[in-house]
């Protein structure tokens, strides 16, 4: 009787105990690796250690998908060299600013030379002058102009998007690119490995048959299976004939031209730039393409010209896991701390890090007007509820918060007073600041700022203001979702 018990339930219990012990040891080893090898920020490290130990199997899978730190690995080592000529130009501009010999079209820029020095010292990103800027907030308008510019291309097209879909809009662009390739125009496409899941292999092969060079950034094991949620190239850059540049929030897909009923009207913001700033967009594209594709394919950078088309002064600022400084995030912080009266933020995801969050609180307590707009419609539930949680802490301090209701707002815009504007690909969240590759244009100009402020207030007519009273009436279930999502915010 006793022997049968020892070989029955006891053996099962012993097996479970052994498995648990092995799992415990494995979790300890993984926790040690997270702490001592990955060198993450303390908050992120603690969260991952807790996740791995409280969710032994599921936590390990989550870490493989979201947690691995690639920033120090070989994947980014090829992107460390910077063109010697650009280095010299950056040093020259930095000396002019420090010695007081830098001249500006707009004299107000002199008050923000500390911000310019920060960009130059961080990633050698310089102020460019004599630019012309067009603002697009409507998908059909933006893509009609882009298609027109592509049709008129004579020499080279550099085409980079996070999301590229082979739907109606995507096929229209593909057909036009093939037509231009047949005319002898050199075409380079760079699509993110996760955002390009709906850009099938047969379409890539078709484009390549016509001589179009295609590179996939950080591809997955299979075309539709990418286990790496982090380190995505979120940039949207188009450069045509070395003279026309596009940067902003629109991707390529039918939803961006208002043809997806689940989203409805798609509200976004995009710049079309002509002038010396296009050089910096071209250089950014070259670095990304060189990493993902064959750098021998790309021969356009040395042919850049700089047409003088306007009087706008701006800095093209990029950031990512391979950068030395969190330049976009730091640019946002400088705008918030230097604001004299108004701060405007339009973003689909509002998950600031602790430093930015404190800067916003201080600005509100100092009597500044902070206006924030996020979509009422949610496309990522955890991110949405985390955003609501952070906003809830700003409402008692007097923040004006608006929930956009006329479709989905995807715009990534930060405005300071009546002068500085940032438009680009970076959301106001930790993922954009640390985990994704992003690019923004920081513009120093009253007219551009005035147009964007006007568009913000036009969007208010399509929004519902979230008051402190409304927020306090939320259900207990909503509070639980907010608290849980905020706990996970460092890895969302």
Image (cartoon, grey):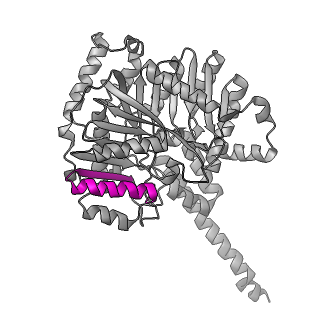
In the rendered view, would you say 13 is above or below 29? below
Q: Position of residue 299 (x, y in %)?
A: 19, 46
Point 47% across, 56% down: residue: 228
Instruction: Locate residue 4 relative to residue 146 in the image: left or right.
Output: right
Instruction: Locate residue 297 relative to residue 40 in the image: left or right.
Output: left
Q: Which of these two is toward me, 177 or 188?
A: 177
Q: Quadrant of residue 355?
A: top right
Task: Tell me, yes or no, if residue 128 can be seen here.
Answer: no
The magenta segment is 166-191
Q: How many marks?
A: 0
Instruction: Locate residue 243 relative to residue 146 in the image: left or right.
Output: left
Judge whether residue 180 is colored magenta.
Answer: yes
Q: Position of residue 210 (x, y in %)?
A: 25, 61
Q: Quadrant of residue 16?
A: bottom right
Q: Which of these two is toward me, 392 or 16?
A: 392
Point 22% across, 45% down: residue: 154
Judge whether residue 400 is colored magenta.
Answer: no
In the rendered view, would you say 211 is above or below 312? below
Q: Position of residue 365 (x, y in %)?
A: 66, 18
Q: Quadrant of residue 467?
A: top right
Q: Position of residue 450 (x, y in %)?
A: 50, 21
Q: Which of these two is toward me, 310 or 99?
A: 310
Task: Tell me, yes or no, if residue 141 can be seen here.
Answer: yes
Q: Which of these two is toward me, 482 or 267?
A: 267
């Amino acid at each position: 009787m006793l022997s049968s018990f020892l070989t029955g339930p006891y053996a099962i219990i012993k097996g479970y105990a052994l498995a648990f012990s092995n799992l415990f040891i494995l979790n300890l080893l993984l926790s040690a690796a997270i702490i001592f090898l990955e060198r993450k920020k303390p908050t992120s490290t603690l969260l991952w250690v807790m996740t791995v130990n409280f969710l032994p199997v599921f936590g390990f899978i989550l870490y493989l998908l979201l947690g691995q730190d690639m920033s120090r690995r070989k994947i980014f080592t090829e992107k460390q060299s910077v063109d010697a000529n650009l280095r010299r130009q950056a040093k020259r501009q930095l000396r002019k600013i420090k010695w007081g010999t830098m001249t500006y079209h707009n004299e107000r820029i002199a008050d923000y030379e500390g911000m310019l020095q920060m960009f130059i010292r961080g990633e050698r990103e310089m102020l460019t002058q004599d630019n012309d800027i067009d603002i697009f907030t409507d998908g059909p308008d933006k893509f009609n102009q882009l298609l027109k510019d592509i049709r008129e291309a004579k020499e080279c097209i550099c085409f980079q998007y996070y999301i590229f879909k082979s739907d109606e809009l995507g096929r229209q662009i593909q057909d036009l690119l093939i037509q231009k390739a047949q005319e002898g125009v050199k075409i380079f496409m760079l699509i993110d490995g996760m955002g390009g899941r709906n850009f099938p292999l047969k379409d890539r092969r078709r484009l390549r048959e016509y001589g179009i060079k295609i590179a996939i950034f950080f591809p997955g094991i299979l075309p539709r299976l990418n286990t790496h949620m982090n380190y995505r190239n979120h940039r949207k850059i188009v450069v045509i004939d070395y003279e026309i540049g596009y940067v902003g929030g629109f991707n390529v897909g039918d939803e961006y031209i208002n043809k997806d009923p689940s989203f409805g009207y798609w509200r976004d913001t995009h710049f079309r730039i002509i002038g010396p700033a296009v050089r910096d967009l071209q250089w950014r594209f070259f670095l990304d393409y060189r990493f993902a594709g064959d750098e021998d394919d790309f021969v356009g950078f040395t042919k850049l010209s700089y047409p003088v088309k306007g009087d706008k002064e701006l800095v093209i600022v990029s950031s990512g896991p391979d950068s030395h400084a969190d330049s976009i995030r730091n640019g946002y912080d400088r705008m918030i701390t230097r604001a004299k009266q108004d701060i405007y933020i339009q973003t689909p995801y509002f998950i600031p890090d602790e430093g930015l969050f404190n800067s916003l609180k201080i600005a509100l307590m100092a009597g500044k007007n902070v206006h924030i707009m996020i979509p009422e419609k949610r496309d990522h539930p955890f991110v949405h509820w985390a955003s609501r949680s952070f906003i809830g802490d700003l409402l008692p301090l007097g923040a004006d918060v608006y929930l956009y209701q006329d479709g989905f707002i995807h715009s990534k815009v930060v405005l300071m007073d009546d002068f500085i504007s940032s438009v680009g690909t970076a959301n106001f969240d930790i993922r954009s600041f640390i985990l994704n590759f992003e690019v923004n244009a920081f513009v120093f100009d009253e007219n551009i700022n005035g147009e964007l402020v006007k568009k913000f207030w036009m969007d208010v007519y399509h929004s519902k203001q979230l008051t402190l009273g409304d927020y306090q009436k939320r259900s207990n279930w909503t509070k639980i979702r907010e608290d849980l999502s905020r706990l996970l915010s460092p890895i969302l």
